[in-house]
Amino acid sequence: MKHLKKIRVTLALCVFLLILLHFLDTYDLVAHKYVNWVFSLQIVPALMRLSSNLIVPLLILIIVLFITLLFGRIYCSVICPLGIFQDVIIRIKRWIKPKIKYKYRRSQMYVHYGIMVMSIGLWLAGSAFLLTLLDPYSNFGRITGSLIKPVIVQLNNFITHQLHNWDIYVLHTVDYKIVIKGLVYSLLFLGTITWLSLWRGRLFCNLICPVGGILSIISRYGILKLRITASACSSCGKCMQACKAECISTKDKKIDFSRCISCYNCIENCDNGAIQFVNVFSDKKVSATNNKPLSFNRRYLITGTLGMGLTLTGLAQPQQHKHRHRHAHNNKVHQSPHPVTPPGSGSLMHFNEKCTACQLCVSRCPTNVLQPTLFDYGFFNMSQPRMNYMVNYCSFDCTVCADVCPTGAIQSLTMDEKHTCQIGKVHFIKRECVVHTDLTACGSCSEHCPTQAVYMVPYKGDLTIPEVNPDICVGCGACEYACPVLPQKAIIVKANTIHQIAEKPATDKLEFDAETDFPF
Amino acid sequence: MKRRVFIQKSIGAGLFASAVSTAPGINNLFAHAPGTEMFDLVAIKGGEPAAMFDKAIQAFGGIQKFVKKGQTVVVKPNIGWNKTPEYAANTNPQLTGQIVKHCYAAGAKIVYVFDNTCNNWQKCYTNSGIEKSVKDAGGKMVPGNTESYYHGVQVNKGKKLQSSKVHELILESDVFINVPVLKNHGGAALTMTMKNLMGIVWDRSYWHRNDLHQCIADFSTYRQPDLNILDAYRVMMRNGPQGVSTNDVVNMKSLFISTNMVSIDAAGAKMFGMEPEKVGYIPIANQMGVGEMDLSKLNIKKMSA
């Protein structure tokens, strides 16, 4: 029993490092397929994938729930990156201040289950807003992808420069741009989770986390539970003081197993071996004394329905209006009325439905064209990434975002499908073009266009000016990015709210007579 | 030294020298005799990239004329696009590798290769085939993807472009070899040696915004590369500079060498089927005194491989 904690810590660190490194692997060292499985174990992404790919996520969910029913919330301490992240914070705190003593606190299960029911209820009603906002995996992703990664990249670039000064080119600098407003929520959440874990251990997991809520209810009716053997207990209180979930009462010699996040600190700290797993079916006393059965009382119901009702009312507001308003407000500003969603996301609706804004795609996007947002998709889809053509453009031969997306918001594309996946259409604004305004050559847009949907045609004198063929445009945004005219670009991509299939550019083979002499 | 020994050694040395000079590959470069006619431009056609370069550079005086023992060299091909060699969007990898080999054979201390690419630089370096051929030849592929590599310089004769940020390798290396590929360009008509220098600066967008042709010509006054090698083995005739399919590409199997960008670009334009005057930056640079674009005034060596 004493080894349980060591096993738990080892497994947790493996999972944590895999997830962390996948977010930070800017050198593309590990193939996605070797790491993606850790991400598919995450509950909320698995829930999101249910509707598009039933079998695998369902199997994963059943296994996770079954393990929870058997042994309790092992998920919270081994699989959940945010749980492990909190453990890391708590561990650091312990190094600085070794004598942290937790004490037993009353369960806040009505608040917690209320939040959980609201999150799931809203999701079933069509908006993953709350679930996304509180999902532990996605929050960990936002922290890692948009806050930790920039630090790592800066560090890498600093070291690289030192090495280059000595003519060593083992490392290379990494371009990394991030739109600041996309960090707002991540920063707020990082502050909150750090404060909560420093103050009361795993309070987040037992008060707010919707995944914790689901697992808590299941573990409440679990089969094997941790229990204090009263005869062996000396009431020293060491288990209670070590319990990050604050669910052990020394006075009553009881463990609220529904809140236990399976860290096994109590087992490790008990000198008498009094804390052990007990099968509830062989010992009726455990279920009778350790857990009150759930009673759906009035307060709980009122909180739940009221909250849900309010949020649903909010959701009923159509989101497109905001964009149309901004577009119509100033006739001179040309911009896409909707954010362009990444190739593979199918449509704005599909993307809004599935994306939990975990920022894994943002973190792995080789060109940084995928950027986190704040309210670009509307309040209820905050933080979702968009294609930001001011920052960069989408690489023609790249499907990385679809390869890594754990929620199915961006679905896999073959390279052929990618080459004709039209996420938006090019839109040329001649009166802004430098060829038109300054009568000087440019062609930057056409130069960057992978399909020549933007091509140059004769203009005044020897000049050439862009002309567009939206049918073969894939909406990669290279033209918009490359256009040197600011602040209003002379060429932009307008989002396809439902992605289309672009026509393939048709060409005939050119011939050249290699036998002719030099023409000079 | 005794006479007999001297004769023996001389015969040995002579045999060795002739063996070297008849050996295939790059060794016979050094058999180039001094006093050969000097050319403004060498044009060769009909061979494979590496073999054409071997012959052409020999006719141009050998690489050792430009690269001395112990010097550092920077070779700047066009690696702008994430395209494989058959698309002809980037400089030919065999040619680039062969140039690196020649530099080392001439005693270069180190040969760097880089470009400020348009697509993702790692993808460009890999898929162009240039990274592999350069590394196989012993050269060093260096990134050019962040602004910190670039340092401000003055372009004193520039009209529109008075300053720019240039990659540190160009500023620090002893020898600069410019190796573009000849191809169609939607905005600048053609891209050749002068246009290729947009890959050694950081802020290209400024050039596009402020009269592209003038800026290209302006920057050509900043410095002449020590050697210009224009790759016209595969040539993209339309949809440039990136190309849509291999249908845009023809096999010209040609190569040009010159120390003057204007002259070599004029020859490239002719080869492509355009008059040099029609390629905006060529007449401007010609007027600014960078070089001669009238090919009839040049001493040109035309060869077949």
Image (cartoon, coloured by chain):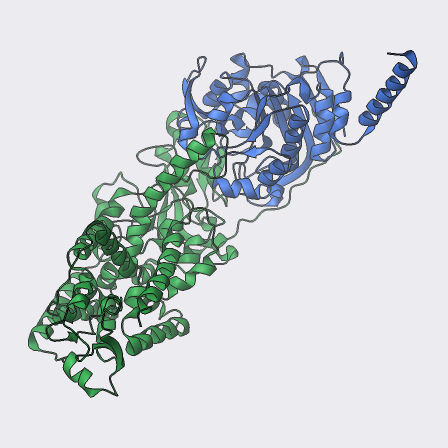
Chain colours: A green, B blue
The answer to whether A105 appears left or right of B5 in the picture is left
* Residue at the farthest left position: A299
Residue A65 point in image, percent of width and height: 31, 75
- Above/below status of A197 relative to B269: below
Please tell me which residue is depicted at 19% across the width and 60% down the height of the picture: A201
Q: In the figure, residue B43 lies in which quadrant?
A: top right
Q: Residue shown at 66%/36% (left/top)?
A: B94
Say if residue A386 shows up in the picture: yes
Side of A257 where B22 appears, left or right: right
Say if A108 sits above or below B188 in the image: below
> At which x and y percent is residue A422?
43, 53
Quadrant position of the C terminus of chain B in the picture: top right
Q: Is residue A124 left or right of residue B165?
A: left
At 63% across and 33% down in the image, what residue appears?
Answer: B96
Q: Is residue B160 above or below residue B81?
A: above
Q: Nearer the viewer, residue A209 or A236?
A: A236
Closest to the observer, A438 or B65: B65
